[in-house]
Image: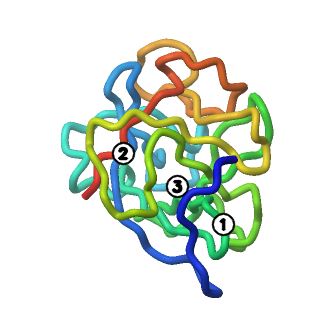
Amino acid sequence: MPEETSFSGHEPQYIFKCNIRTELNGKFVDLAGGGGMEPPVIAFDTGNPATNPNQIWLILGVPNKSAVLIQSLANGEYLVARGNGQRLRAQQVDWRDESAHWYIEGGDVHSGEWDWETKVKIRSSKYPDCVFDQEGGFGQGAPMLIWTDHGGPNQIFKLWKR
């Protein structure tokens, strides 16, 4: 992974909070039902992502790495990768667990400067060939997966800083 700015220290550092919007159909990465649902993380549009905690994510810098953690505002859990083709999950894991480390490709989130129109891929640190992927179709509630990077619009996102 390209090394951009990284944070030193011993604990993750807050960078910003955002909505994660899919380029495919404009839906937002959503913690289904506030957690505990199956599928656990979906593409969903409630019409008001600025105030829906299920669609607000904290971006935290991992100490001494260019990777980030993506933490749910709704329940404090981190988004984790469990392997290619597996559904994206929000779980209570130690922040050092590499399954919770992500690379934002297409912009330097560590700088604190962010353009809403910047298109990015969100790549797994643990499974470097895999990225966030909105599973087939355009429907409300489509599961979010970790899938081999193919560059399609279902793997491109915008981070709407809040």
In the image, which disc is placed on residue 4? none
> Badge 3: few (under 14), some or many (20 or more) residues near its Cα, within 10 Å?
some
Residue found 39% across the figure and 33% down from its top: 119
Tag in front: 3 or 1: 1
- Helix, strand or loop at disc 2? strand
Say which label, 1 or 2, has the lower sequence index.
Answer: 1
Q: Position of residue 134 (x, y in %)?
A: 53, 26
Residue found 28% across the figure and 54% down from its top: 161
> Badge 2: few (under 14), some or many (20 or more) residues near its Cα, within 10 Å?
many
Q: Position of residue 46 (x, y in %)?
A: 26, 38
Q: Amino acid at mark 2?
A: Leu
Say which label, 3 or 1, has the lower sequence index.
Answer: 3
Colour convention: rainbow
Q: Judge from the rendering whether residue 31 lies leftward or rightward of residue 51; answer left or right.
A: right
**Residue bearing the label numbered 2:** 159
Residue found 64% across the figure and 18% down from its top: 150
Q: CA distance from mark 1 to mark 2?
A: 20 Å
Q: Judge from the rendering whether residue 136 lies leftward or rightward of residue 158; answer left or right.
A: right
- Helix, strand or loop at disc 3? loop
**Residue bearing the label numbered 3:** 35
**Residue bearing the label numbered 1:** 65
Q: Judge from the rendering whether residue 156 lies leftward or rightward of residue 27; answer left or right.
A: right
Badge count: 3
- Check the image and report above or below for 142 versus 80: above
